[in-house]
Amino acid sequence: MELVVQKYGGSSLATVEQIIRVAERVVEAKARGTDLIVVVSAMGNTTSELFDLATTISKNPASRELDMLLTAGERISMALLSMAINDRGCHAISFTGSQSGIITDCQHTRARIVDVKASRITEELVRNRVVIVAGFQGVSSTKEVTTLGRGGSDTTAVALASAFRAKECEIYTDVAGVFSADPRVVPDARKLDSISYVEMLELAASGAGVVHHSAVELAYRFGIPLHVRSSFSRERGTMVTSSPEKDQKCVKGIAHAVGMVLARLHGLEKTPEATGSLFRRLEESGVEVRLFNESSLPSQEGVFVLVVPEADGARVEEVCGSLLRNQAGTMELVPDVGLVTVVGSNLLWTACTCSDAFSTLASAGIEPLAASCSAITLSFLVPAEKTEQAVRQLHRTFVVEGSTASL
């Protein structure tokens, strides 16, 4: 039989009624003759509530104990969903990440999957059972419980889909698929029928929260088709595959993220060794760099621009500050910025395209703090309060009016 991996997010499992609805959906899929592995997140806001509980007890909770606490949310979901499926006459069994054979490195709260040894899952599939797996978690080589950080359940699902060569990995969420912009910000945003891995990866990394970028990257690497769809309807969602991009220039979407910090580094030594050292230290500190760019002032003093989430601001200040002190450099931190990214295919960001983007922002009275481009992206840093306005204006220019091409 064909095997499909399904992943249900917290919004799809927030209440008992929603868990029952998911159970009925799983039973229907199993009745059609499909082998199923179902990956679950914690119910609703459980993970945030557990984290708040931890910080109430301790201002700086130990990362090991935090992982022990946070993984409880997914264990609740997996057990309840398994009970609901069994009550409907379909055999199911639930496993934690460690029981499922999700092997990670030893980094608590932000571990990475290094191997999948899913012999227990295989045994239960042979017994014709639906296997429910707690997402977001695994076990390290030192037998410690670990969590995978942001988007961990998405990553768990794709890792299992890859290990079992699944037909596809279905990502169930509370929206109908991938849209050309956040529908909460842009009411006329369009649902995409399909999108390439590369485009989806750029959208996800730039703030589109429907699928985490680490999961998209893993799916891309192993060629696992992703089907992003709503758990509240039966409609088809958005397929993320390696299908060739269209020949014409085409903007697929506008992604955005708020709560960012812009760091301008003046006087950083401009050598590959110095740049490599900077990023190595940022990685070791767990800093998530969303964007970086390098330029030169007329004085030839190097200006290096980094954009990171506000939660990583203190670590950026510590890492970059220590490097710059050794080089007599300075650092400027600008809080409360938003990142807006236009993503498309075959754009190569001609002068005309860039002109349209800058003119659009200028007509709305928005002056970017910084900009960066690649073959398929054009990103702007803007004041946080201008972020949603920038998204709407760029969406109108490139999607609604079709400055480059229609979707």
Image (cartoon, grey):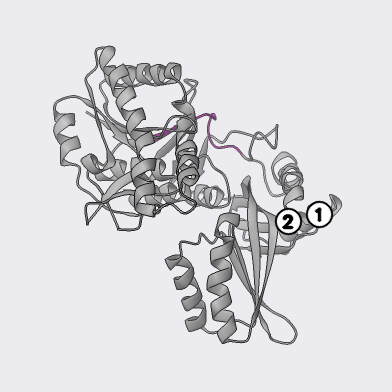
- Report x, y in % for residue 226: 41, 39
Residue pictured at 47% horizontal, 40% vertical: 53
Q: Nearer the viewer, residue 220 or 391?
A: 391
Give the vertical position of 176 relative to 254 (above or below): above
Left or right: residue 306 compared with residue 236 = right
* SS for dot 1: loop
Q: Are marks 1 and 2 in contact (CB under 8 Å)?
A: yes
Dominant secondary-structure state across the stretch colored magenta: loop
Q: Is any atom of residue 230 visible in this view?
A: no
Left or right: residue 151 compared with residue 84 = right
- Report x, y in % for residue 99: 21, 40
Q: What residue span does the magenta drawing correspond to?
A: 170-179
In terms of sequence position, does the residue under pointer 1 or pointer 2 come before the other?
1
Give the vertical position of 327 relative to 30 (above or below): below
Give the quadrant of residue 267: bottom right
- Report x, y in % for residue 129: 20, 25
Q: Return the mark for residue 153.
A: none
* SS for dot 2: strand
Residue pictured at 14% horizontal, 26% vertical: 127
Residue pictured at 54% horizontal, 78% vertical: 322
Does the segment drawn in magenta span residue 328? no
What residue is disc 2 on?
A: 382
Total of numbered circles in the picture? 2
Does the segment drawn in magenta span residue 173? yes
Quadrant where the image shows the N terminus:
top left
Extreme residue in the front direction: 57
Q: Nearer the viewer, residue 157 or 150?
A: 150
Q: State how far apart marks 1 and 2 are (Cα).
A: 7 Å
User: Three-letter amino acid code at disc 2?
Assistant: Val
Residue pictured at 45% horizontal, 38% vertical: 50
Q: Return the mark for residue 366.
A: 1
